[in-house]
Image: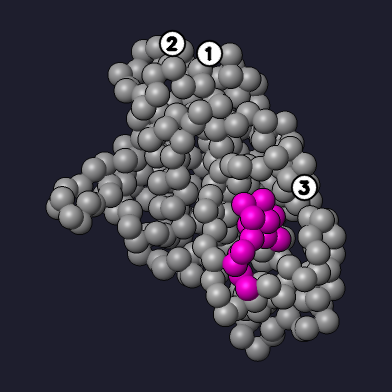
Amino acid sequence: MATLKVTDLHVSVTDEEAKTSKEILKGVNLTMNTGETHAIMGPNGTGKSTLSETIMGNPHYQVTQGNITLDGVSLLGKTVDARARAGLFLAMQYPAEIKGITNMEFMRAAVNATRPADDPISVRAFLKELDKNLEVLNMSDDMAERYLNEGFSGGEKKRNEILQLMMIKPKFAILDEIDSGLDIDALQVVAKGVNQMQSPDFGVLMITHYQRLLNYIHPDQVHVMMGGRIVKTGDATLATELEAKGYAGLRDELGLDVDLVDEDVTTGNGGR
């Protein structure tokens, strides 16, 4: 069992043009183990995507206090690729398009980066695993030969992120609004891929503002973020409660002094 732990995390973002800094995360605490599925929900501007980017090591975000550890080892100061090699994976909300490198080349390089230098995956083993996962995700064989995300639809990009996840097999996957923009059929396929990964050696942290995703990938814990903090944690029924009350209702119930970007926001109108 591996453990990812976020302790009293404070994160700021600097506006280079205005020469100002704004604190986004204001003391986030979160512990998850492999074999568990966690979901983070929250209104616009509360810091959900900031948390995912910070865990993965995006240098745009400055950690001013607290720590992020994987199996007791601090990740602060480690590069994105070092964190990936340690077992973290981020499925991005807006995957980048990269010309000149095919999906197959990218994924094989990523898989080998997690293996000893003298033990790369064989071409036969790689292709066998790739074919199996393409079938699970209802993706055509020619997807592997196309340049990374170039000309892909939104749904194809999201499926491609899950294909990479299934090939790399990290300890922890952070899914940043992987359901955004997906129709119901594509959502079911993406969820099928994630669910197939479930094991005692794999953990999922889903960031979403759509309760519908949780109908297909069932969380062990749901965390609600407001004002840069996790303000409430519960089981899957907490998402249903949010749908009924909205974030404003939960804020008022908890007596929090938090301004919401959209005062009447519900779980259907969340954000970053």
Q: Residue 90, percent across and down?
A: 55, 56
Residue carrying label 2: 253
Residue carrying label 1: 245
Magenta-drawn stretch contains 151: yes
Q: Which residue is situated farthest in the bottom direction here?
A: 118
Magenta-drawn stretch contains 52: no
* Position above or below: 112 against 33: below
Q: Which residue is situated farthest in the left direction here?
A: 19
Task: Using the image as rendered, state which of residue 65 and residue 137 is in the foreground.
Answer: 137
Residue carrying label 3: 189
262 relative position to 18: left or right = right
Residue 181 location, quadrant: top right
Q: Nearer the viewer, mark 3 or mark 2?
A: 3
Callout 3–callout 2 Cβ contact below 8 Å: no
The answer to whether one can see residue 107 in this image is: no
Q: Earlier in the sequence, mark 2 or mark 1?
A: 1
Find the magenta span and give its range: 147-163
Q: Earlier in the sequence, mark 1 or mark 3?
A: 3
